[in-house]
Image: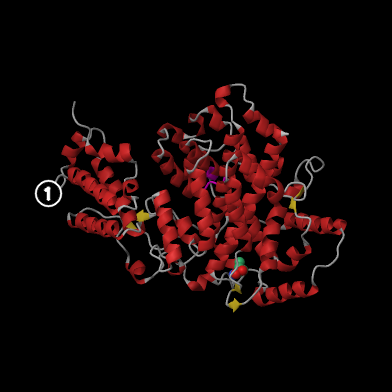
Amino acid sequence: MAEEPSRMKIRDEDSLRFVHCLSSRDPGVRNRAFDSILRVFDALIGGHGSPPDMKGMATIHGAVDTKEMIDEYLVDILRLSVQCPFEDVLDRCKELLRDMQERTYKIPRVLKGGISTFVPEREIIPASSKDTETQALFVDAFLQNNRLDHVVQLMGYHPQYLECFLRTQQYLMKGDGALPFHYRHYIAIMAASRHMCTYLVHLHEQEFILQGGDPEWLKGTSHVPKKLRDLNELNKLLAHRPWLICKSHIEKLARSTNSKDNWSISELVQALILMAHFHSLCSFVYGCGIKSEIDHNGGFTYRPQSPVEKNSNDFDSSDSSSTNGDINSEPEVGIELLMERMKKLVEEGEEETTQEERVKRFEKVESQSVEIAANTVRPSPKAEVLKYVDDAEYCYQDFAKRDSVEDIPTFRATDYSWEDHGFSLSNRLYMDIGNQLEDKFSVATNMTYYTMGEVRDVDTTAFRRAIWSYIHCLYGIMHDDYNYGQVNQLLERNLKAYIKTMTCYPERLTRKDYDNVMREFKHSEKVHVNLMLLEARFQAELLYALRGVMQFMT
Ligand SMILES: CC(C)C[C@H](N)C(=O)O
């Protein structure tokens, strides 16, 4: 029998993305991996120096298009030459690209300003950061995901948070747990598709294949086992109107008539956490204008660099003049006034209010939020993502305008809270996850640098708490010990609209929205706010999901 072309050994057997072979801490292993890759490459291009015999190669590899295959390799190599934290791999990749160029191959190049459309490239923490803590996290992320993805790189502003984020994500995707690995990635795809987030969908399609997933499934949810398809309804509610989740939704999955499709409670808890994690990550991706990964469509180009690009540092025109926002937009309160208001709140101290009064204030913020217009322009959904969703039109509806007000009361955090209920339930059904999430929530709520724009030594607690509480309010969750009057004092309309769009309709967020709020804040601070939005939304979804599980179990 003729030997399989060596390409198959790397592409399909070891890993689809050969970069996987290079994700080792051991330089010996990396070297060996690189050598075998070079051998494949040499075979593909028909030996040293000589121009490739495309026709000959095509015969060897049957139907495989050699040109396409080489292009794919080159894109992988390009990515490594930018993202790989190991000097040895980096240098060899660069060498290889030069070598290929000399052989007159068209070499792809990374599009400048490739990480975020909102944050200028020069302000983003570089892949080879001088800060040792951040650098170590970037290396870990690379080893974990076979890449340093743009989300992680942008979170690099906040290493304290990034550490918890990576730990949890690693545990969810690769750690112990009831669900098979390829299921976890498929659930990530389904969740991200609710917000049409092609960025996350593509990332997890690749990971799904790496974990041995069946490529057929990537044709859409009509090609997956019924068990997974059954998640559709819960995925939809959780993403857009989690308050509708109740015992019966859990029951339906956990008591399926066909045992093959049955979800165990542990599996279901993991699936729910995964969905909430990825829904809220969509908010972050859109909120930071995250761009396609280098090796995804839109991340690289074969076009030669234009003179304009050569001269500018930021290809995507993220120059500082435009970050000052639109002249026509609403004037902002500004940091000075915001600080004054926060100071006043501290000086006044906690006022004595009755429970009734607190509820009234909550309801006021809640009903006002209906008037806050989130963007209405929806990007047109792409077929590559639509295949993973049912009922794509279904979206967020103001909690205050919910259909059955009598049946669905405000969610009182005193009755069901993360600290007293969610934490222990999740820990019990999915070992250790409660602790990990607890750490992440705690960093997200407490993280502070005591700064606001250029000002130092500021206590920002009240502002941060107002943001968190407002998001929960959008989901109908009330914290009894919070005075909701503060939300209106500290969050102006513009910011509320931004929060609402990013939390509830992230796919509608635009560069202008990002530019026009928190104008005196630094980019790292806007990313900080976006992290809080992510976590507050995540916790809101989780509370409803876990309450549903608890109702089912009791
Ligand atoms: C979101 C920002 C206003 C946070 C602020 N820079 C702080 O250190 O607390």
Q: Name the image quarter holding residue 315.
A: bottom left
Viewed as shown, does residue 81 lie left or right of 431?
left
Work out which residue is located at the far top of the displayed protein and give it.
258
Q: Which residue is mark 1?
A: 50
Residue drawn at (64%, 54%) of the image: 536
Q: Is residue 195 magenta?
A: yes
Give residue 114's quadrant in the image: bottom left
Q: Is residue 66 magenta?
A: no
Q: Residue at x 51, y 46 (%)?
A: 171
The percent coordinates of residue 185 (x first, y second) are 48, 41
| Viewer can see residue 376 | no
Task: Give amino acid for label 1.
Answer: Ser
Q: Position of residue 309 (x, y in %)?
A: 36, 67
Q: Secondary structure at mark 1?
A: loop
Label 1 crowd bin: few (<14), some (14–19), many (20+), radius 10 Å: few
User: What span is colored magenta in the figure?
Assistant: 192-197
Direction from residue 332 to residue 169 in the image, left or right: left
Q: Quadrant of ligand 1?
A: bottom right
